Image: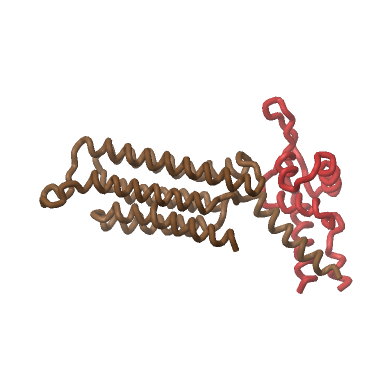
């Protein structure tokens, strides 16, 4: 007779455990928009790195200006993705009528930021030291590590995404001439795929 | 059946107390206003349920000041953890 009540109790327990410990307002649209922005960024970088592909010695043309331009593209891509992420996340939070700046959000962002900041500083140093080609796989690896670290505090799917990014980064370290392609897959295609999966899951 | 019912904890029959325990068991601590937001209850209602759990020694709290405003952090005790997991196990057995 109390069967339904206990099933309800168990659901309540599970729901409260999730809501109190994880940041759940991740919107699939954040992923999709970040992916599209990353693809544009990758295309722009491609034009900077691989100019004059017709002449063999200029296949990998590098000028002092290239570092600066690439850096600007990277910063632009980062700002646009974060902006889109904030926009869609705030919208999702409002839809679920939750607070945007609560304990869960802070904990998620801190745990995401630690590997990301360390990696970002490291990549900048590499860029200025001239190890430009390694920067692309490294951004993938550090981003993946950040996602794996942060996944404990948000939707568990993020962990798989992180592992995929790490894998792509490691492969890209070997096949350095296709680095940008891997970057476009990792930051562009994977984000879009994940965004769509999350959006579909959310609807069902 | 009677044996199973004995393991069910009266203190967790109430949905709000059940919610409080669920939130505390997976977090190091949760403050009063977060609990209020999570459960969607009034100050007075939440306070009275917290008092019941506190009397049973299932939770403890620490008063702090954040920007000169009082902020109470609640956390689960070892006793509370034990009682809660026993309660969940009893429900799961009942449903089998």
Of A91 and B95, the residue lying toward us = A91
Residue A13 locus on image (x, y percent): 73, 57
Label total for image:
0
Residue A73 locus on image (x, y percent): 33, 40
Q: Which chain is brown?
A: A
What residue lies at 86% left-to-right and 47% top-to-bottom? Answer: B52
What residue lies at 44% left-to-right and 48% top-to-bottom? Answer: A34
What residue lies at 24% left-to-right and 40% top-to-bottom? Answer: A130
Left or right of B3 on screen, residue A89: left
Residue B78 locus on image (x, y percent): 74, 51
Of A26 and A164, the residue lying toward us = A26
Residue A108 locus on image (x, y percent): 55, 45
Quarter of the image containing the C terminus of chain B?
bottom right
Residue at the outermost top position? B68
Residue at the outermost right position? B2
Quarter of the image containing the N terminus of chain B?
bottom right
Left or right of B47 on screen, residue A16: left
Chain B rendering hue: red
What residue lies at 85% left-to-right and 54% top-to-bottom? Answer: B11
Left or right of A156 on screen, residue A133: left
> By what rule are the colours in the image chosen?
by chain
Of A193 and A108, the residue lying toward us = A193
């Amino acid at each position: 007779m109390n069967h339904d009540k206990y099933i309800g109790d168990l659901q309540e327990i599970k729901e409260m455990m999730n809501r109190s410990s994880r940041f759940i307002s991740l919107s699939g649209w954040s992923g999709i928009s970040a992916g599209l922005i990353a693809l544009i960024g990758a295309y722009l970088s491609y034009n900077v790195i691989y100019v004059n592909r017709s002449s063999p010695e200029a296949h990998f043309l590098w000028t002092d200006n290239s570092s600066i331009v690439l850096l600007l593209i990277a910063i632009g891509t980062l700002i646009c993705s974060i902006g889109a992420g904030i926009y869609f996340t705030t919208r999702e939070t409002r839809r679920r009528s939750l607070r945007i700046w609560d304990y869960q959000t802070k904990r998620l962002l801190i745990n995401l930021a630690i590997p990301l900041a360390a990696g970002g500083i490291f990549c900048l140093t590499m860029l200025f030291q001239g190890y430009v080609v390694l920067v692309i796989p490294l951004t993938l690896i550090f981003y993946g590590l950040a996602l794996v670290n942060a996944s404990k505090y948000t939707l568990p799917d993020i962990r798989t995404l992180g592992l995929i990014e790490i894998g792509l980064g490691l492969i890209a370290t070997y096949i350095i001439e296709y680095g940008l392609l891997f970057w476009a897959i990792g930051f562009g295609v994977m984000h879009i795929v994940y965004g769509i999966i999350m959006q579909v899951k959310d609807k069902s | 059946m009677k044996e199973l019912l004995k393991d069910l904890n009266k203190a967790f029959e109430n949905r709000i107390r059940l919610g409080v325990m669920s939130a505390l068991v997976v977090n190091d601590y949760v403050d009063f206003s977060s609990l209020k937001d999570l459960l969607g209850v009034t100050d007075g209602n939440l306070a009275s349920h917290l008092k019941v759990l506190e009397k049973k020694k299932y939770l403890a709290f620490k008063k702090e000041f954040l920007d000169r405003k009082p902020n109470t952090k609640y956390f689960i005790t070892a006793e509370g953890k034990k009682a809660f997991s026993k309660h969940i196990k009893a429900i799961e057995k009942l449903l089998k």
